[in-house]
Image (spheres, rainbow, N blue to C red):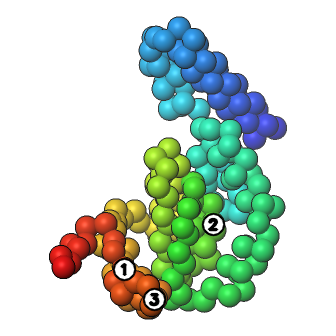
Amino acid sequence: MNKLLLRVVNLFGYFIAKILTVVDFIFRKKVSLFLKLAIEKYMSTTITNNGIIFDATEMSNYYRGRDLLKREPDTLYWIDNYMNDNDVFYDVGANIGTYSLYAANKGGLKIFAFEPESSNYYYLNKNIYLNGTILGMTKKEIDFKDIKNELKKNNLLGQPSETSDKRYWPGDKEEKS
């Protein structure tokens, strides 16, 4: 009963926060911002699935967390059956980190999650923070040079093709002819 009541209170707070967001948009005022932040601060806006905590401030993130075990069963099967201790897991286009967190929950993997879109990147970092103490994850900012070095180290960069004898990355100096 207490869980049901808590869920109802949390949903009520969530919907009030969304209504205030719409009011801000319509009237172009930030009057309700303080109230919205206060509500979100004291109301739970997370969902837990399979021991992984997801930020559920946005409905799309709520559905991603809720449907973790339903959305891409082949990906989950691959993580469960083919990833071994000390393997490296690259999640390119990680979104909010659903599969990175799932892989981290398995344990023993080195995980790199890449997400270029700023709001998804924000939620990816927030989800890493929410799960950090549970999964032993830490956040590390990396730049293109770090990515290039990691790919080279794990022999994933490939060899130059016949049409290109050099691969350029952001930050590389081009050779002048």
Q: Residue at x 65, y 46 (%)?
A: 61
* Whether residue 65 is situated above or below residue 140 in the rendered picture: above
- Residue 19: give its label: none
Q: Is residue 146 left or right of residue 106?
A: left
Above/below status of 79 relative to 56: below
The residue beneath circle 1 is 167
Residue 55, how many percent across, how many down?
58, 46
Towards the viewer: 78 or 105 = 78
Q: Quadrant of the C terminus?
A: bottom left
Q: Residue at x 77, y 55 (%)?
A: 67
Crowdedness near tag 2: few (<14), some (14–19) or many (≥20) residues, C-alpha within 10 Å: many
Asked which quadrant contains residue 12, the reply is: top right
**Residue 126 appears at what percent x and percent y?**
48, 50
Which mark identifies residue 161? 3
Residue 99 is marked as: 2
Q: Amino acid at mark 1?
A: Arg
